Image (cartoon, helix red, strand yellow):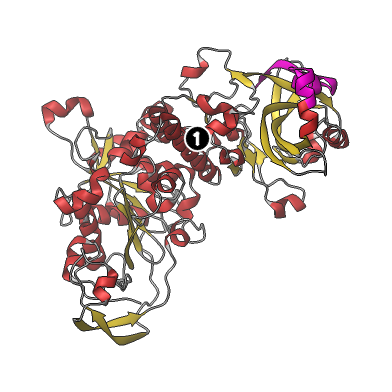
């Protein structure tokens, strides 16, 4: 159900609460073409309102103004000129931030997120750099680049950053240098253009739109909305009313279906794009049906004038959990967080990191060695917020919980004899890191907050090399991690593993094994189990007269020893639950203060110091 946009909505791109009907109906008709003047008017209105210093815009877009102070310009940008420019685009070389005092503030620039591929990718190399500095014929460009240039010009921006054109693709030295600045490129770009529905560079950004003419137009009597300070109930009870029309249209896909479903958004499958979208202060998404706007002030759609997230609900929920509808707020320490204790704030950032890793692990990288570079910009921001070091994708301050990552099995593939994931080859990370496999990972133990997790018997962890903590080399694959805790060694065969768990001291068990490799490979040679944590659980009735049952949940790693070396590789993760009577526990505690250590030792577990690689 839609109504036509009012003049104020056309001017600002925001919902007009003084417009009769706008209070009640959020839908707006789509324009027939994403490259139409009306769509560009809407995009310009969104951008203008977001960067405006007006009092009303400032109230909801305060977080959007962080990057408006000039101070960074990439090494190279594509100078696209103005909408009426007759000059061909060309690659412009900038001296960098150090020259700002002499040459004045750098020009604003846009960035492009897109899928590589096509008949022939257009790239800049050391061979054609000088030629590119003079001109890049517009007609020779792939369609996606042409559309991006048109969008940039229409938004009144003169410079555009496209990775394949602005980084020398045949120079490893230039790639390393520019990749270190990648976070700044997206953070300081005025706007990011996301080619959501394009499969490759020849596919273009503007999609053909299905006929979305009104199925029917109906008369409607709107209560007269006196102003935004009135509630809907006030408006409904008003004695004044106004006649108007509403139109009925086919239902549109929502935000998630349009921008997260790979069938609608090939871009959502790209690994590099995650940090591009999160780091950019503003993104205009060109979807398969409509265009979307996202900034820290909120997200809005061409066909839906109701901004997201809704400014209601528990602030703790809003700032803690992952959701694309406020992705631009995801990296912001919003004011509500300043009122929380430091441990609560750290918990929020750790939880957000685990959400990022889960989403990132589902995505595709053309070059597997990019696993850490494609996440480096986000890593730097989280290190700054947490005052912590990220090593091989896990934070040192929450390492025992981070080690409990689990590979998500593809059940259909598993039934055919495959795990649905594979070990990265060549190796791109130590085996204890989630980055050592190719496939989706999750962090189920993140359901425990830090204080709950730290109440258990946690394994001691340290990096033996002092250089490791401060290493910035993303290509490091053999970082050693030292662990001291309970170790059960020489488990031979899957049945032996089951028998050991069944005879463990606390009675019944329910193991959940999430291997990094198929089961038959894990159990084909001797394994060891390292306990990462043993958490006390609930007390509940177990047997009449027993005084209740005490539950302990244990998390551990399945390990293989590396032949000829005194170290271990991670090959899987397990979780199991022990239950025993409170009477037994009380008796053991009274008899021996070290009852836990003795209990494990009697059954083959020893406290050992081992090295994981």
The kind of secondary structure element at disc 1 is helix
> In terms of depth relative to the viewer, which is nearer, 558 or 600?
600
Is 508 drawn above or below residue 262 in the view shown? above
The spot of residue 186 in percent (x, y) is: 33, 40
Question: Which residue is at the far front?
Answer: 545
Residue on which the image places disc 1 = 370
**Picture layout, residue 7 above or below residue 216:** above
Corner quadrant of residue 68: top left
Q: Which residues are the magenta region?
A: 587-613
Q: Tag count in the figure?
A: 1
Q: Is residue 488 visible?
A: no
Residue 5 position in % (x across, y down) = 23, 72
Taking 176 as reference, is 576 left or right? right
- Out of 127 and 168, give the one closest to the viewer: 168
Viewer-nearest residue: 286 or 583: 583
Q: Nearer the viewer, residue 446 or 65?
A: 446
- The stretch drawn in magenta includes residue 447: no
Q: Residue sitting at 20 percent across and 72 percent down?
A: 19
Left of 502 or right of it: where is 286? left
Residue located 59% across and 44% down the image: 440
Q: Quadrant of the N terminus?
A: bottom left
Q: Residue 64: give x, y in percent of width and height.
A: 26, 45
Question: Where does residue 418 sit, x and y in percent of width and height?
Answer: 73, 47
Q: Quadrant of residue 98?
A: top left
């Amino acid at each position: 159900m839609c109504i036509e946009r009012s003049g104020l909505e056309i001017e600002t791109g925001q919902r007009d609460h003084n417009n009769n009907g706008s209070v009640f109906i959020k839908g707006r008709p789509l324009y027939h073409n994403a490259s139409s003047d009306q769509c560009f008017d809407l995009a310009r209105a969104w951008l203008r309102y977001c960067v405006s210093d007006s009092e009303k815009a400032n109230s909801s877009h305060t977080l959007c103004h962080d990057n408006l102070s000039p101070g960074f310009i990439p090494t190279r940008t594509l100078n696209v000129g103005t909408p009426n420019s007759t000059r061909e685009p060309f690659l412009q070389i900038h001296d960098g931030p150090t020259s700002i005092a002499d040459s004045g503030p750098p020009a604003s620039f846009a960035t492009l997120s897109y899928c590589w591929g096509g008949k022939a990718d257009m790239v800049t190399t050391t061979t054609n750099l000088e030629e590119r500095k003079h001109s890049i014929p517009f007609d020779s460009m792939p369609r996606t680049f042409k559309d991006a240039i048109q969008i940039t010009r229409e938004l009144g921006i003169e410079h555009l950053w496209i990775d394949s054109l602005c980084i020398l693709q045949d120079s490893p030295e230039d790639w390393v240098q520019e990749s270190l600045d990648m976070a700044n490129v997206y953070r300081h770009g005025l706007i990011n253009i996301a080619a959501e529905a394009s499969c490759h560079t020849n596919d273009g950004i503007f999609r053909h739109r299905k006929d979305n003419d009104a199925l029917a137009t109906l008369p409607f009597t709107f209560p007269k909305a006196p102003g935004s300070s009135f509630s809907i109930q006030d408006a409904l009870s008003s004695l004044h009313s106004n006649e108007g029309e509403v139109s009925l249209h086919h239902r549109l896909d929502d935000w998630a279906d349009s921008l997260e479903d790979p069938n609608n958004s090939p871009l959502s499958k790209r690994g590099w794009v995650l940090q591009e979208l999160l780091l950019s202060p503003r993104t205009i998404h060109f979807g398969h049906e409509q265009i979307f706007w996202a900034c820290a002030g909120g997200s809005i759609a061409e066909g839906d004038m109701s901004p997201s997230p809704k400014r209601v609900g528990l602030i703790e929920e809003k700032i803690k959990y992952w959701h694309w509808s406020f992705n631009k707020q995801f990296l912001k320490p919003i004011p509500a967080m300043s009122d929380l204790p430091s441990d609560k704030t750290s918990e929020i950032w750790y939880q957000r990191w685990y959400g990022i890793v889960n989403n990132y692990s589902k995505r595709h990288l053309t070059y597997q060695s990019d696993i850490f570079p494609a996440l480096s910009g986000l890593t730097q921001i989280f290190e700054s917020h947490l005052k912590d070091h990220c090593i091989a994708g896990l934070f040192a301050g929450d390492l025992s919980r981070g080690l409990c990552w689990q590979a998500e099995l593809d059940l259909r593939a598993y039934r055919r004899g495959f795990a649905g994931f594979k070990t990265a080859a060549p190796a791109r990370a130590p085996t204890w890191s989630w980055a050592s496999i190719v496939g989706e990972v999750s962090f189920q133990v993140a359901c425990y907050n830090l204080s709950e997790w730290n109440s258990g018997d946690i394994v001691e962890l340290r990096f033996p090399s002092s250089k490791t903590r401060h290493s910035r080399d993303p290509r490091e694959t053999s970082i050693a991690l030292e662990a001291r805790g309970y170790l059960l060694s020489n488990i031979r065969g899957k049945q032996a593993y089951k028998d050991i768990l069944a005879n463990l001291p606390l009675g019944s068990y329910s193991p959940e094994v999430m291997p990094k490799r198929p089961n038959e490979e894990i159990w084909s040679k001797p394994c060891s189990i390292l306990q990462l944590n043993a958490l006390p659980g609930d007390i509940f009735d177990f047997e009449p007269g027993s005084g209740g049952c005490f539950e302990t949940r244990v998390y551990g790693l399945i390990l293989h020893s590396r032949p000829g070396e005194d170290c271990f590789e991670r090959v899987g993760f397990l979780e199991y639950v022990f239950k025993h009577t409170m009477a037994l526990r009380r008796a053991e505690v009274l008899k021996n203060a070290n009852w836990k250590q003795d209990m494990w030792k009697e059954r083959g577990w020893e406290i050992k110091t081992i090295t994981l690689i």
